[in-house]
Image: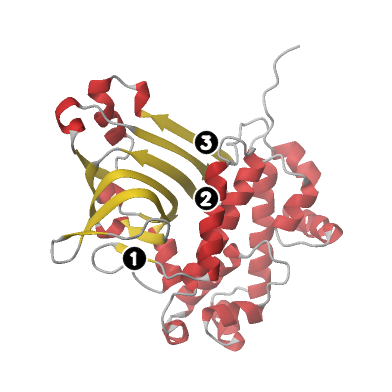
Amino acid sequence: MPQGQPHPPPVTLIRASTSSAPQSEQFDYWREMFPGVDMTPSGEARVTGQFHGELIGIQSVSAGVALSRTISSSNKARFNALGGEDVLLGIFDSGRLGLRDERGHMKELQSTGTLYILDAGRAPEFQAEQLSNLYLTLPRSYATGLLGGDPTPRCGFRQLPRTSLGQILHDHLLAISRQFNDLGQEDADAAILAAKSMAATLLRGMAPARRDKVQKLDHKDLVAAARQCMSDRLHDPSLTVTDLSRTLGCSRAHLYRAFRELDMSVAEELRIMRLTRAAEHLRCSNREVGDIALASGYADFSAFTRAFHRYHGLSPRDYREAYGYKPIRPAS
Protein backbone atom coordinates (compact mmCIF):
# COMPACT_ATOMS: atom_id res chain seq x y z
CA MET A 1 0.00 0.00 0.00
CA PRO A 2 1.44 3.43 -0.92
CA GLN A 3 3.05 5.29 1.92
CA GLY A 4 0.88 8.00 3.38
CA GLN A 5 -2.42 6.41 2.30
CA PRO A 6 -4.79 6.34 5.29
CA HIS A 7 -5.81 2.99 6.77
CA PRO A 8 -9.13 2.23 8.40
CA PRO A 9 -9.12 1.94 12.19
CA PRO A 10 -9.23 -1.65 13.55
CA VAL A 11 -12.74 -1.13 14.91
CA THR A 12 -15.62 1.21 14.20
CA LEU A 13 -18.05 2.30 16.89
CA ILE A 14 -21.64 2.42 15.64
CA ARG A 15 -24.23 4.48 17.50
CA ALA A 16 -27.69 5.70 16.54
CA SER A 17 -30.97 6.62 18.20
CA THR A 18 -34.41 7.52 16.89
CA SER A 19 -34.41 10.45 19.31
CA SER A 20 -32.39 12.35 16.69
CA ALA A 21 -35.33 12.23 14.24
CA PRO A 22 -38.66 14.10 14.37
CA GLN A 23 -41.27 12.07 16.24
CA SER A 24 -43.41 11.45 13.16
CA GLU A 25 -40.38 10.05 11.29
CA GLN A 26 -38.80 7.94 14.01
CA PHE A 27 -40.02 4.56 12.76
CA ASP A 28 -38.90 5.33 9.20
CA TYR A 29 -35.51 6.41 10.56
CA TRP A 30 -35.16 3.09 12.39
CA ARG A 31 -36.29 1.03 9.41
CA GLU A 32 -33.76 2.69 7.10
CA MET A 33 -30.94 1.60 9.42
CA PHE A 34 -31.66 -2.06 8.63
CA PRO A 35 -31.91 -2.43 4.83
CA GLY A 36 -31.87 -6.23 5.13
CA VAL A 37 -35.06 -6.30 7.21
CA ASP A 38 -38.63 -5.49 6.17
CA MET A 39 -40.28 -3.83 9.18
CA THR A 40 -43.88 -2.98 9.96
CA PRO A 41 -44.76 -0.72 12.91
CA SER A 42 -46.91 -1.93 15.79
CA GLY A 43 -48.92 -0.02 18.38
CA GLU A 44 -48.48 3.76 18.53
CA ALA A 45 -45.83 3.82 15.79
CA ARG A 46 -48.42 2.54 13.31
CA VAL A 47 -50.49 5.68 13.84
CA THR A 48 -48.03 8.42 14.76
CA GLY A 49 -44.67 7.20 13.45
CA GLN A 50 -43.24 7.74 16.94
CA PHE A 51 -40.83 4.91 17.79
CA HIS A 52 -38.05 4.30 20.31
CA GLY A 53 -34.95 2.58 18.99
CA GLU A 54 -31.30 2.58 20.04
CA LEU A 55 -28.34 0.90 18.36
CA ILE A 56 -24.80 0.71 19.65
CA GLY A 57 -22.12 -1.62 18.40
CA ILE A 58 -18.54 -2.36 17.42
CA GLN A 59 -17.46 -3.54 13.97
CA SER A 60 -14.05 -5.24 13.85
CA VAL A 61 -11.95 -5.17 10.66
CA SER A 62 -9.63 -8.02 11.65
CA ALA A 63 -12.41 -10.29 12.99
CA GLY A 64 -14.77 -9.56 10.11
CA VAL A 65 -17.74 -9.50 12.49
CA ALA A 66 -19.71 -6.96 14.51
CA LEU A 67 -21.25 -6.97 17.99
CA SER A 68 -24.39 -4.87 18.39
CA ARG A 69 -27.02 -4.09 20.98
CA THR A 70 -30.47 -2.93 19.92
CA ILE A 71 -33.32 -1.70 22.09
CA SER A 72 -36.58 -1.08 20.28
CA SER A 73 -40.32 -0.59 20.60
CA SER A 74 -42.78 -3.14 19.26
CA ASN A 75 -42.60 -4.06 15.56
CA LYS A 76 -43.01 -6.88 13.09
CA ALA A 77 -40.08 -7.77 10.86
CA ARG A 78 -38.83 -10.19 8.23
CA PHE A 79 -35.36 -10.56 6.74
CA ASN A 80 -35.19 -10.00 2.99
CA ALA A 81 -32.62 -10.77 0.28
CA LEU A 82 -30.29 -8.00 1.48
CA GLY A 83 -30.07 -9.57 4.91
CA GLY A 84 -29.61 -13.14 3.74
CA GLU A 85 -25.83 -13.28 4.03
CA ASP A 86 -25.71 -13.04 7.83
CA VAL A 87 -26.33 -15.20 10.86
CA LEU A 88 -26.97 -13.57 14.22
CA LEU A 89 -25.64 -15.32 17.31
CA GLY A 90 -26.93 -13.50 20.33
CA ILE A 91 -28.96 -13.04 23.47
CA PHE A 92 -32.52 -11.80 23.95
CA ASP A 93 -31.82 -9.67 26.98
CA SER A 94 -35.38 -8.60 27.78
CA GLY A 95 -38.80 -8.13 26.20
CA ARG A 96 -40.90 -10.59 24.22
CA LEU A 97 -40.25 -12.23 20.87
CA GLY A 98 -42.53 -14.29 18.66
CA LEU A 99 -41.35 -16.24 15.63
CA ARG A 100 -43.49 -17.67 12.83
CA ASP A 101 -42.87 -21.41 12.58
CA GLU A 102 -42.92 -23.66 9.50
CA ARG A 103 -46.71 -24.12 9.86
CA GLY A 104 -47.29 -20.37 9.76
CA HIS A 105 -48.11 -20.02 13.48
CA MET A 106 -46.57 -17.24 15.56
CA LYS A 107 -44.91 -18.89 18.55
CA GLU A 108 -43.60 -16.93 21.53
CA LEU A 109 -40.05 -17.88 22.38
CA GLN A 110 -38.98 -18.49 25.96
CA SER A 111 -35.43 -17.38 25.29
CA THR A 112 -34.68 -14.38 27.47
CA GLY A 113 -31.08 -14.56 28.64
CA THR A 114 -30.15 -17.58 26.52
CA LEU A 115 -28.06 -17.88 23.37
CA TYR A 116 -29.70 -18.28 19.98
CA ILE A 117 -28.92 -18.38 16.26
CA LEU A 118 -31.09 -16.41 13.85
CA ASP A 119 -30.42 -17.30 10.21
CA ALA A 120 -31.21 -14.36 7.91
CA GLY A 121 -30.84 -16.66 4.92
CA ARG A 122 -34.02 -18.43 6.01
CA ALA A 123 -35.92 -15.11 5.95
CA PRO A 124 -37.47 -15.64 9.41
CA GLU A 125 -40.50 -13.56 10.34
CA PHE A 126 -40.77 -12.34 13.90
CA GLN A 127 -42.69 -9.99 16.16
CA ALA A 128 -40.90 -8.09 18.93
CA GLU A 129 -42.32 -6.25 21.91
CA GLN A 130 -40.04 -3.85 23.81
CA LEU A 131 -37.05 -5.99 22.90
CA SER A 132 -33.46 -5.61 24.10
CA ASN A 133 -31.23 -7.74 21.91
CA LEU A 134 -27.46 -8.36 21.87
CA TYR A 135 -25.95 -10.18 18.91
CA LEU A 136 -22.76 -11.08 17.10
CA THR A 137 -23.15 -10.84 13.31
CA LEU A 138 -21.38 -13.69 11.48
CA PRO A 139 -21.20 -14.41 7.73
CA ARG A 140 -23.73 -17.14 6.93
CA SER A 141 -21.13 -19.15 5.00
CA TYR A 142 -18.84 -19.05 8.03
CA ALA A 143 -21.50 -20.39 10.42
CA THR A 144 -22.59 -23.02 7.90
CA GLY A 145 -19.01 -24.26 7.56
CA LEU A 146 -18.59 -24.56 11.32
CA LEU A 147 -21.88 -26.40 11.80
CA GLY A 148 -21.41 -28.63 8.79
CA GLY A 149 -24.77 -27.58 7.34
CA ASP A 150 -27.65 -25.13 7.67
CA PRO A 151 -27.42 -23.16 10.94
CA THR A 152 -31.12 -23.45 11.84
CA PRO A 153 -34.26 -25.52 11.36
CA ARG A 154 -36.83 -24.54 8.76
CA CYS A 155 -38.13 -21.52 10.66
CA GLY A 156 -34.73 -19.77 10.78
CA PHE A 157 -34.26 -19.81 14.55
CA ARG A 158 -32.33 -22.13 16.84
CA GLN A 159 -31.93 -21.84 20.59
CA LEU A 160 -28.52 -23.12 21.67
CA PRO A 161 -28.17 -25.71 24.43
CA ARG A 162 -26.80 -24.64 27.77
CA THR A 163 -23.09 -25.52 27.97
CA SER A 164 -20.14 -24.23 29.97
CA LEU A 165 -18.60 -22.57 26.91
CA GLY A 166 -21.97 -21.13 25.94
CA GLN A 167 -22.27 -19.52 29.38
CA ILE A 168 -18.76 -18.07 29.08
CA LEU A 169 -19.60 -16.62 25.65
CA HIS A 170 -22.90 -15.28 27.02
CA ASP A 171 -21.09 -13.49 29.86
CA HIS A 172 -18.35 -12.25 27.54
CA LEU A 173 -20.84 -10.65 25.12
CA LEU A 174 -22.67 -8.96 27.99
CA ALA A 175 -19.38 -7.68 29.44
CA ILE A 176 -18.38 -6.13 26.11
CA SER A 177 -21.79 -4.47 25.75
CA ARG A 178 -21.46 -2.87 29.18
CA GLN A 179 -18.06 -1.43 28.22
CA PHE A 180 -18.91 -0.14 24.73
CA ASN A 181 -18.19 3.45 25.71
CA ASP A 182 -14.97 2.77 27.61
CA LEU A 183 -13.13 0.30 25.37
CA GLY A 184 -10.25 1.63 23.32
CA GLN A 185 -9.92 0.43 19.74
CA GLU A 186 -7.26 -2.18 20.44
CA ASP A 187 -9.08 -3.59 23.48
CA ALA A 188 -12.38 -3.67 21.59
CA ASP A 189 -10.76 -5.49 18.67
CA ALA A 190 -9.22 -8.08 21.02
CA ALA A 191 -12.57 -8.57 22.80
CA ILE A 192 -14.43 -9.11 19.51
CA LEU A 193 -11.77 -11.54 18.24
CA ALA A 194 -12.13 -13.54 21.47
CA ALA A 195 -15.91 -13.60 21.07
CA LYS A 196 -15.58 -14.85 17.48
CA SER A 197 -13.16 -17.58 18.55
CA MET A 198 -15.48 -18.78 21.32
CA ALA A 199 -18.48 -18.68 18.98
CA ALA A 200 -16.56 -20.72 16.41
CA THR A 201 -15.65 -23.38 18.97
CA LEU A 202 -19.23 -23.51 20.25
CA LEU A 203 -20.75 -23.90 16.79
CA ARG A 204 -18.13 -26.39 15.62
CA GLY A 205 -18.91 -28.60 18.61
CA MET A 206 -22.58 -28.72 17.57
CA ALA A 207 -21.84 -30.20 14.12
CA PRO A 208 -23.31 -33.73 13.87
CA ALA A 209 -21.27 -36.67 12.56
CA ARG A 210 -18.37 -34.40 11.69
CA ARG A 211 -15.90 -37.18 10.92
CA ASP A 212 -18.16 -38.75 8.27
CA LYS A 213 -18.86 -35.40 6.68
CA VAL A 214 -15.19 -34.38 6.52
CA GLN A 215 -14.04 -37.70 5.15
CA LYS A 216 -16.45 -37.18 2.24
CA LEU A 217 -15.25 -33.65 1.46
CA ASP A 218 -13.13 -33.22 -1.63
CA HIS A 219 -9.62 -31.96 -1.00
CA LYS A 220 -10.41 -28.38 -1.95
CA ASP A 221 -13.25 -28.17 0.59
CA LEU A 222 -11.17 -29.89 3.27
CA VAL A 223 -8.36 -27.36 2.80
CA ALA A 224 -10.91 -24.53 3.04
CA ALA A 225 -12.24 -26.00 6.30
CA ALA A 226 -8.70 -26.39 7.64
CA ARG A 227 -7.86 -22.78 6.78
CA GLN A 228 -10.96 -21.63 8.66
CA CYS A 229 -9.85 -23.62 11.72
CA MET A 230 -6.39 -22.07 11.44
CA SER A 231 -7.92 -18.58 11.23
CA ASP A 232 -9.86 -19.20 14.45
CA ARG A 233 -6.69 -20.24 16.31
CA LEU A 234 -3.91 -18.13 14.79
CA HIS A 235 -3.22 -16.74 18.26
CA ASP A 236 -2.47 -20.22 19.65
CA PRO A 237 1.25 -21.11 19.35
CA SER A 238 0.51 -24.73 20.31
CA LEU A 239 -1.73 -25.34 17.28
CA THR A 240 -0.51 -28.45 15.43
CA VAL A 241 -1.55 -30.58 12.48
CA THR A 242 -2.80 -33.14 15.01
CA ASP A 243 -5.09 -30.50 16.56
CA LEU A 244 -6.40 -29.54 13.11
CA SER A 245 -7.08 -33.11 12.05
CA ARG A 246 -8.80 -33.87 15.36
CA THR A 247 -11.01 -30.78 15.01
CA LEU A 248 -11.88 -31.64 11.42
CA GLY A 249 -12.44 -35.30 12.19
CA CYS A 250 -9.91 -36.67 9.70
CA SER A 251 -6.48 -38.27 9.91
CA ARG A 252 -3.25 -36.28 9.63
CA ALA A 253 -2.34 -38.24 6.51
CA HIS A 254 -5.65 -37.29 4.91
CA LEU A 255 -5.06 -33.63 5.72
CA TYR A 256 -1.49 -33.71 4.38
CA ARG A 257 -2.71 -35.32 1.14
CA ALA A 258 -5.41 -32.68 0.68
CA PHE A 259 -2.89 -29.83 0.97
CA ARG A 260 -0.29 -31.61 -1.15
CA GLU A 261 -2.80 -32.15 -3.97
CA LEU A 262 -3.22 -28.36 -4.14
CA ASP A 263 0.57 -27.83 -4.01
CA MET A 264 0.29 -26.49 -0.47
CA SER A 265 1.87 -27.31 2.88
CA VAL A 266 -0.13 -27.29 6.12
CA ALA A 267 2.71 -25.73 8.13
CA GLU A 268 3.54 -23.19 5.42
CA GLU A 269 -0.08 -22.13 5.07
CA LEU A 270 -0.35 -21.61 8.83
CA ARG A 271 2.86 -19.54 8.80
CA ILE A 272 1.62 -17.35 5.93
CA MET A 273 -1.75 -16.79 7.59
CA ARG A 274 -0.06 -15.77 10.85
CA LEU A 275 2.33 -13.34 9.17
CA THR A 276 -0.49 -11.89 7.05
CA ARG A 277 -2.58 -11.35 10.18
CA ALA A 278 0.41 -9.73 11.91
CA ALA A 279 0.89 -7.33 8.98
CA GLU A 280 -2.81 -6.42 9.16
CA HIS A 281 -2.48 -5.56 12.86
CA LEU A 282 0.64 -3.49 12.17
CA ARG A 283 -1.18 -1.52 9.46
CA CYS A 284 -4.50 -1.05 11.21
CA SER A 285 -3.71 -0.68 14.91
CA ASN A 286 -1.30 0.86 17.38
CA ARG A 287 -0.84 -2.33 19.38
CA GLU A 288 2.64 -3.05 20.66
CA VAL A 289 4.67 -5.25 18.32
CA GLY A 290 5.15 -7.82 21.10
CA ASP A 291 1.38 -8.05 21.60
CA ILE A 292 0.92 -8.52 17.85
CA ALA A 293 3.48 -11.35 17.89
CA LEU A 294 1.49 -13.12 20.62
CA ALA A 295 -1.82 -12.50 18.84
CA SER A 296 -0.29 -14.05 15.72
CA GLY A 297 0.77 -17.25 17.49
CA TYR A 298 4.43 -16.44 18.17
CA ALA A 299 5.45 -16.88 21.80
CA ASP A 300 9.09 -16.09 20.89
CA PHE A 301 9.48 -12.47 19.79
CA SER A 302 12.83 -13.09 18.07
CA ALA A 303 11.36 -15.94 16.04
CA PHE A 304 8.45 -13.69 15.06
CA THR A 305 10.79 -10.89 13.93
CA ARG A 306 12.90 -13.27 11.82
CA ALA A 307 9.88 -14.93 10.22
CA PHE A 308 8.21 -11.59 9.51
CA HIS A 309 11.37 -10.20 7.88
CA ARG A 310 11.81 -13.27 5.70
CA TYR A 311 8.23 -13.10 4.45
CA HIS A 312 7.60 -9.34 4.17
CA GLY A 313 11.16 -8.12 3.54
CA LEU A 314 11.02 -5.68 6.47
CA SER A 315 11.18 -5.98 10.23
CA PRO A 316 7.82 -5.51 11.98
CA ARG A 317 8.78 -2.01 13.16
CA ASP A 318 10.05 -0.97 9.71
CA TYR A 319 6.90 -2.37 8.15
CA ARG A 320 4.74 -0.30 10.49
CA GLU A 321 6.84 2.78 9.74
CA ALA A 322 6.33 2.26 6.02
CA TYR A 323 2.70 1.12 5.93
CA GLY A 324 1.18 1.61 9.37
CA TYR A 325 -1.78 3.79 10.23
CA LYS A 326 -0.59 7.25 11.23
CA PRO A 327 -3.16 9.48 12.95
CA ILE A 328 -3.21 13.03 11.60
CA ARG A 329 -1.73 15.36 14.17
CA PRO A 330 -2.82 19.01 14.33
CA ALA A 331 -0.26 21.51 13.18
CA SER A 332 1.61 23.16 16.00
- The residue tagged with tag 1: helix, strand or loop? strand
Which amino acid type corresponds to the residue marked 1 in the rendered image? Arg
| Within-10-Å neighbours for mark 3: few <14, some 14–19, many 20+ | some
Q: Is residue 314 above or below residue 151?
A: above
Q: Label 3, on which residue?
A: 13
Q: Is residue 292 left or right of residue 181?
A: right
From mark 1 to mark 2, how far is it between C-alphas?
20 Å
Q: Is residue 114 above or below residue 67?
A: below
Q: Which residue is located at x 68 percent, y 76 percent?
A: 240
Which of pointers 1 and 3 indicates the residue nearer the eye?
1
Q: Label 1, on which residue?
A: 158
Question: In the displayed image of the protein, which residue is found farthest to the right?
Answer: 302
- The residue tagged with tag 2: helix, strand or loop? helix
Residue 314: x and y, percent?
A: 78, 48
Which amino acid type corresponds to the residue marked 3 in the rendered image? Leu
Circle number at residue 169: none
Label 1 vs 2, first from the N-terminus: 1
Which amino acid type corresponds to the residue marked 2 in the rendered image? Leu
Residue 268: x and y, percent?
A: 68, 69
Which of the two residues, 164 or 260, is positioned nearer the viewer here?
164
Residue 209: x and y, percent?
A: 42, 84
Label 3 vs 2, first from the N-terminus: 3
Which of pointers 1 and 2 indicates the residue nearer the eye?
2
Q: Label 2, on which residue?
A: 174
Location of residue 295 (image quadrant): bottom right
Label 1 vs 3, first from the N-terminus: 3
Residue 52: x and y, percent?
A: 32, 32
